[in-house]
Amino acid sequence: MFLSVFEMFKVGIGPSSSHTMGPMVAAARFLQRLRTSPFRPAGLRASLHGSLAFTGVGHATDRAVILGLAGFEPDRYDAARAEAALAAIRAHRRVEPPGLPPLSFDPATDLRFDRTRALPGHANGMILAATDPEGDTILAETYYSVGGGFVLTEAELAEAKAGRAPPAPAVPHPFGTAAEMLAMARESGLSVAQMKRANELAVHGEERLERGLARIWEVMSACIDRGLAAEGTLPGGLGVRRRARGIHEKLLAERGLNLTAPHTINDWIGVYAMAVNEENAAGGQVVTAPTNGAAGVVPAVLRYWLDHVPGASPARIGDFLLAAAAIGGIIKHNASISGAECGCQAEVGSAAAMAAAGLAEVLGGTPMQVENAAEIALEHHLGMTCDPVRGLVQVPCIERNGLGAVKAVSAASLALRGDGIHLVPLDAAIETMRQTGEDMSHKYKETALGGLAVNVPNC
């Protein structure tokens, strides 16, 4: 099994990897299929189903689909150009994607939120169709946004569920479970990050790997800095005020005071994560880690290590990210990173496990301690629901990232106090998360039909 660090960490836009990035990616894939098809399309249509229909407006899914069908892609997103394109599309009721003729598309009638019919493959389903001049469908495809910006067609999802996914590239340490990872570490004498690095080098080569890792941290760090500097109210109608700047300014003012409480360090960790998720809620550029809803945890813990832990070195940022990606890949392979599938335990819980592993790695942890750190962090997120108020990635998501980052640091610290031997294996925690998500009512999995989403007034 091999999931690249560049699959677990993707540069994109907020507020949601599954509801914003995924649909935009799906639209790009459909356009590419149209470019290579023998048909001469005249128009486009789209329908959103399941969680995409219930919380799509709050997650800007409509904007993502419209812009995706106009040729926009998450990793090269330009906000100013996007706003101009949206205005033109709504005014002229057509899109002009590169490599295709202008296509009729009226967002008011050609984009439907179908809350009556969920598609069978996954909670995040959508159907894209091309039409002829008479409005008849000439080409259609069903896509599923399965979390973290990953998108599968209906056929690809069926193949994956049947165990017939495309073969993974040959790598020297192809671990698919934590147990396999530890066995390979014992055999090779390598750390988790060293094994993951060897796997990535076999696929990408050194120059692309180093350049890509640097780019991931560059975007993460810039997102923290923007979030710490920004003020105002987040979009969406809840009236949620940005708090990261105010908290950060108070922390800076308290620096050096003799009476500062030791637990104040938790506020530093939390504010870094909140800064990221306020940027995400505002539709800014973020890195999925492993999702947008959980994008603040990994960068917050990494920034905490760099800025607050003696002996931290920027030269080891890559090791942090590689160890975190190794754990994220195991979780995604054996369970889910999708809130629509397994609740927030799959998003912030997975992110905390990844961040704990990364921190344990750069603090000198053995592979057993790295695995233990990830297990502690995930175990203590088990059962967490995904219940966004009004479908927005704001409440409870922003604070939840802050607390997830604090948990990740605590989990790494606790693991490093031991020798790596522990009762609950990470694989058991992952399987428990999968089973819990499977049993969880759909009301508590990103539909905004249960939990805080219905018990907090949002009008």
Image (cartoon, rainbow, N blue to C red):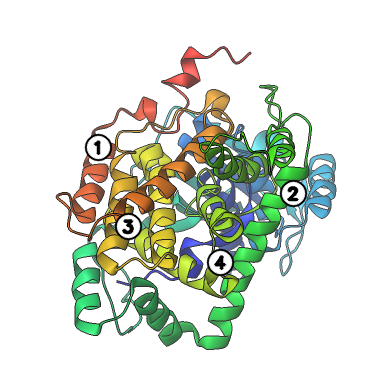
Mark 1 to mark 4 CA distance (whole Å): 37 Å
Is label 2 or label 4 in front? 2
**First in sequence: mark 3 vs mark 4:** 4
Q: Quadrant of the N terminus?
A: bottom left
Residue at 22% x, 70% y: name it: 182
Is label 3 or label 1 in front? 3
Q: Is residue 274 left or right of residue 243?
A: left
**First in sequence: mark 2 vs mark 4:** 4
Q: Percent from the top left, x then y, of residue 63? A: 68, 43
Mark 3 to mark 1 CA distance (whole Å): 28 Å
Q: Look at mark 1 in the image and give the residue it sits on.
A: 436
In the image, 121 versus 105, the foreground residue is 121
Q: Quadrant of the C terminus?
A: top right
**First in sequence: mark 3 vs mark 2:** 2
Q: Percent from the top left, x then y, of residue 11? A: 61, 61
Residues at marks 1 and 4 touching, judged by CB atoms closer than 8 Å: no
Question: Could you tell me which secondary element the residue under label 2 belongs to?
Answer: helix
